[in-house]
Amino acid sequence: MTGGSFSLSDNTNTKEIAEYIIKRILTGERNIRAIKSEAALKFGSDAIVRNSDIIRIAIRLVKKKAGQNNAKRIANIIQILKRKPIRTLSGVTPVAVMIKPEGSCRWNCIYCPAAGKAAKSYTGEEPAALRARANNFDPTMQVKDRLNQFRIGGHPTSKCEIIVMGGTFLQMDEEYKQSFIKGIYDALNCNSNKRKNAKTLAEAKKINETAKCRCVGLTIETRPDVCGEKEINEMLDYGTTRVELGVQHPDDKIYKIINRGHTVEDVIRATALLKDNGFKVLYHIMPGLPDSNPKKDIEMVRELFENPEFRPDMLKIYPALVTGGTKLHEMMKHGEYTPYSSEEAADLISEFYRYIPKYVRVMRIQRDIPAGLIQGGVKKSNLRELVENKIREKGIIPKEIRWREIGLNKEKLDGKFDIRTETYSASGGTELFISYENTTSGIIAGFLRLRIPNGLIQRKEIGKNTAIVRELHVYGNEETIGKKSAKASKTAQHTGIGRALLKEAEKIAKKRFMKSEMIINSGMGVRRYYYKLGYKSKGNYVAKNL
């Protein structure tokens, strides 16, 4: 396979694939990513057809089709494909970058697809994996390609949230890791093709502070046992702001059955290390594993938030899936394991929402694995929609962040907004979730995570009189950097909310906790914002005397 532009425009299968996708959408399906992945698998393509290609063919179909209804329906499809605002309603543009398959992970969990077409834990047919394959797993090409797709779809690309996906990146060799991360920054910095690549990673990071496409957040996926002091320092050097831990189900018996290779204690230690050094913490959890059941899975979620040794900031919920060639597949064939159906998973996950607190965001429900590769488990591509329908049917009132985001709830706005603070203990320290919420509906426009550490501090930048801002996020449609928002009702970005939240956090840190310094683990592309508010560079952080 060769790299280059990620398009099927010259592929003879394009028309057939696009028509297949259009027909699926006409039946009412809306998970376009999943449909594209299944189409690529069905037609034996190594790449996903672009929206622009589908639109081009849809326009031809509109001209050919007899009957006004069909023409209108296809015209609606064109509008759906032209712009998918859900991508940037949370305030940033997400860009997934996948590592190479070779040497991507040395562990052998029983449910995990082996590295082959893509890095371990991916089949190679997921949208991100197909993009990576089309670009020979080159990080610079992947980022440039994805940004170009967003622009075609009408999305702004000035604020990018990068996620490094696949395998266990942090256990790969040092030269590869440095080169990979630098390649990401080079793509963001050089996207206009007017700037040459930086000579070093440090230079690339510095350039990104003023680039047109800025990295406002960098996420790395890792295992709890590959997240110690060495990895913490390494990730800070990369500019990492969020870490996604593969927690699955924190139970040592289950870990042994699934051949996970680490313990619950590893999860607890990694979580504390990350928080005390300023990272946002996301858990991947996997209901439906062997030796679990719905009751155990609900208890697992309750434990995650009742036990202060866990309490992550975010969740990705991936019900266990069975794919070919795995030990879990063998267990299922021999009657030793039965995965949840789509209906069972939707009902179970809806119950999770009773226990997820207001400071947590459910980032994702369900993997992107094409249904044709799933031997057992959830095959419906709209699991999140099914979960949300169950929540409404049961009368559950979720407190979690995504359910209340202003970008997804503009029609519910009424009354005034106010700053609210929730304090809780977590991983040996004190956490304060400071949010800007509608006083009537609870709709959230922005929030800040303030930590008063009391545990595994290892960085010289963080002293005993230091408070840490781990996250500051304002929701609504992504606004271009430097652009003043004209209508606060349409977006919460660039309306002074972030400044107000930070001012409140500084006041709390100084007056309530007697701290004399605030430190922030900031994405490279956000540092100029903090400089304007009196912060200065301090090692891998920005800091301000209070």
Image (spheres, rainbow, N blue to C red):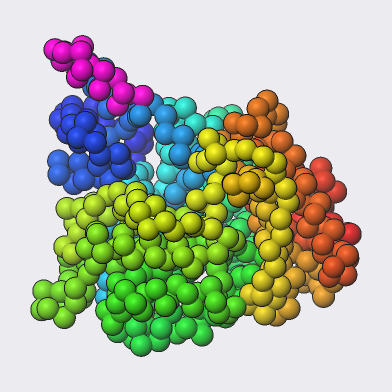
Depicted 310 relative to depicted 252: above or below: above
Magenta segment: 63-79
Residue in view at x 54 percent, y 58 percent: 399
Most foreground residue, 117 or 340:
340
Depicted 309 relative to depicted 58: above or below: below
Q: Is residue 30 found inside the magenta-colored segment of the image?
A: no
Residue in view at x 38 percent, y 26 percent: 82
Residue in view at x 85 percent, y 68 percent: 512
Q: Quadrant of residue 238?
A: bottom right
Q: Quadrant of residue 539?
A: bottom right
Most foreground residue, 286 or 217:
286
**Where, quadrant-wise, is the N terminus in this rendering?**
top left
Q: Position of residue 153 (x, y in %)?
A: 42, 29
Q: Quadrant of residue 320?
A: bottom left
**Where, quadrant-wise, is the C terminus in this rendering?**
bottom right
Q: Is residue 18 visible?
A: no
Residue in view at x 75 percent, y 70 percent: 452
Depicted 56 relative to depicted 269: above or below: above
Depicted 355 relative to depicted 490: above or below: below
Left or right position of 40 against 128 = left
Q: Is residue 359 visible?
A: yes
Q: Position of residue 226 (x, y in %)?
A: 50, 75
Q: Position of residue 210 (x, y in %)?
A: 69, 38
Q: Main SS type for the magenta part?
A: helix
Left or right position of 148 against 191 = left
Q: Position of residue 109 (x, y in %)?
A: 31, 75
